[in-house]
Image (spheres, rainbow, N blue to C red):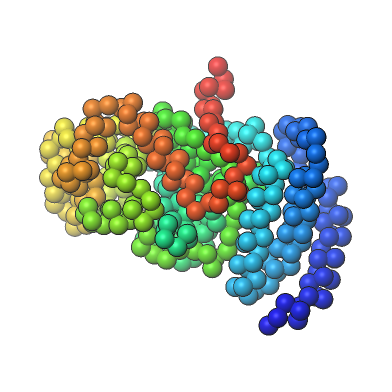
């Protein structure tokens, strides 16, 4: 069908939509925590940005109501353009606004009662990781930009089992800060989880947009814990990571545990699963690991206490020559691990996001709750 065939109804939709927005504007305009920046000497860029947002927003509204895949793809492109225009003209929430979201996430992470050692931090970190780790550099698909784990079948992929817990938690934050995109919310939550559990500062910046179910990624893009080194490299090289970054990102297993009713595997990796540290690597080399005798999938347990576990993909870090070099370095130097994890995790969280959508040319460093009190 040609564009001319629906040009007239499109104009009518845009015209009526603009009036509806005008009627709502005075009552629903969101005020951010800081005043807008002073106007630049030339307003040309501002007018262009405002025009792009207005046109893009109206057209996106019309296309969103359409059920066709083509219309939704076009709507996504327009939302991306609108986000880019907002970023270019500074018409976006400020760092202070996002700090408030961070603080609310930190509160929720700590309000876990008896869930997994009293913290939702590890499962929230896993949400951010899995929402970003679907990126394919060859096709430019996947990554954190569209937050497609909101949709089936991606939400039901085996690697995402149990993440409904984290998504439901973040929905509470979304209701309080409805202006934030899911992609920004989930990745910021990952940053908060790392930092609030004594981990390194993770540079982060907003600018992701929400997509549609049609943009969900196929199953099989996340690591399969039962596999070996070739599989790990296939998964991470597809995203654009090298061996050093692979090993650094695996260090997130210092946190949390596996659940038999989710992944099939069971148990924590370390003795302090709510504290970010280099213990994952130290235990890999310091403990004697044997295959666990049980009815579940193949996993290892520490011979001494039989209370810790390692996955096949974890243990391969001590067997592969290249991986082992980095894993040993991180076992010996926590500061080096923190530095390299911070860089690799920040990179992971930005996969799939067009650079022009980001509201800042350089990532921000969010303050922890304790830092704000001092």
In the figure, is residue 83 to the left or right of 50?
Answer: left
Quarter of the image for the N terminus: give it: bottom right
Question: Toward which corner of the image does residue 94 lie, by quadrant?
Answer: top right
Answer above or below: position of 144 versus 199. below
Instruction: Name which residue lies at 47% across and 50% down.
Output: 351
Instruction: Name which residue lies at 42% across and 66% down.
Output: 218
Instruction: Name which residue lies at 83% across and 53% down.
Output: 24
* Image location of residue 243, percent across then percent down: 28, 45
In the figure, is residue 101 to the left or right of 203?
Answer: right
* Image location of residue 79, percent across then percent down: 66, 57
In the figure, is residue 21 to the left or right of 252?
Answer: right
Question: Toward which corner of the image does residue 46 lie, by quadrant?
Answer: top right
Answer above or below: position of 61 versus 38. below
Question: Toward which corner of the image does residue 159 lie, by quadrant?
Answer: bottom left
> Which of the pair 244/67 is nearer the observer?
244
In the figure, is residue 371 to the left or right of 30?
Answer: left
> Which of the pair 360/35 is nearer the observer?
360
Q: Residue furthest top?
A: 374
* Image location of residue 14, percent across then percent down: 81, 66
Instruction: Name which residue lies at 84% across and 71% down.
Output: 12
């Amino acid at each position: 069908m040609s564009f001319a065939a629906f040009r007239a109804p499109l104009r009518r939709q845009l015209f009526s939509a603009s009036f509806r927005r005008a009627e709502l504007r005075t009552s629903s305009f969101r005020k951010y925590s800081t005043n807008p920046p002073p106007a630049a000497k030339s307003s040309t860029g501002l007018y262009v940005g405002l025009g792009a947002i207005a046109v893009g927003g109206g057209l996106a509204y019309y296309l969103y109501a359409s059920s066709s895949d083509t219309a939704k793809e076009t709507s996504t492109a327009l939302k991306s353009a609108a986000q880019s225009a907002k970023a270019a003209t500074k018409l976006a929430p400020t760092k202070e606004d996002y700090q408030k979201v961070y603080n609310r996430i930190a509160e929720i992470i700590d309000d876990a009662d008896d869930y997994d050692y009293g913290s939702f931090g590890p499962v929230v970190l896993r949400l951010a990781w899995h929402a970003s780790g679907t990126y394919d550099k060859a096709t430019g698909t996947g990554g954190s930009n569209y937050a497609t784990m909101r949709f089936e079948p991606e939400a039901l992929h085996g690697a995402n089992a149990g993440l409904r817990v984290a998504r439901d938690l973040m929905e509470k934050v979304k209701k309080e800060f409805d202006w934030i995109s899911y992609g920004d919310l989930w990745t910021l939550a990952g940053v908060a989880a790392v930092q609030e559990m004594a981990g390194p500062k993770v540079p982060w910046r907003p600018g992701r947009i929400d997509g549609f179910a049609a943009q969900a990624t196929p199953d099989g893009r996340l690591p399969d814990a039962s596999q070996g080194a070739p599989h790990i490299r296939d998964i991470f090289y597809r995203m654009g990571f090298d061996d050093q970054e692979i090993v650094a990102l695996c260090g997130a297993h210092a946190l949390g545990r596996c659940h038999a009713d989710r992944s099939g595997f069971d148990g924590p990796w370390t003795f302090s699963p709510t504290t970010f540290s280099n213990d994952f690597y130290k235990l890999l080399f310091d403990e004697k690991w044997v295959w666990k005798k049980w009815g579940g999938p193949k996993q290892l347990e520490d011979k001494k206490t039989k209370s810790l576990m390692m996955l096949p993909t974890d243990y391969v870090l001590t067997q592969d020559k290249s991986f082992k070099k980095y894993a040993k370095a991180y076992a010996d130097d926590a500061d080096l691990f923190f530095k390299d994890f911070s860089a690799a995790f920040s990179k992971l969280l930005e996969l799939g996001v067009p650079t022009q959508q980001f509201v800042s040319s350089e990532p921000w460093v969010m303050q922890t709750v304790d830092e704000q009190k001092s």
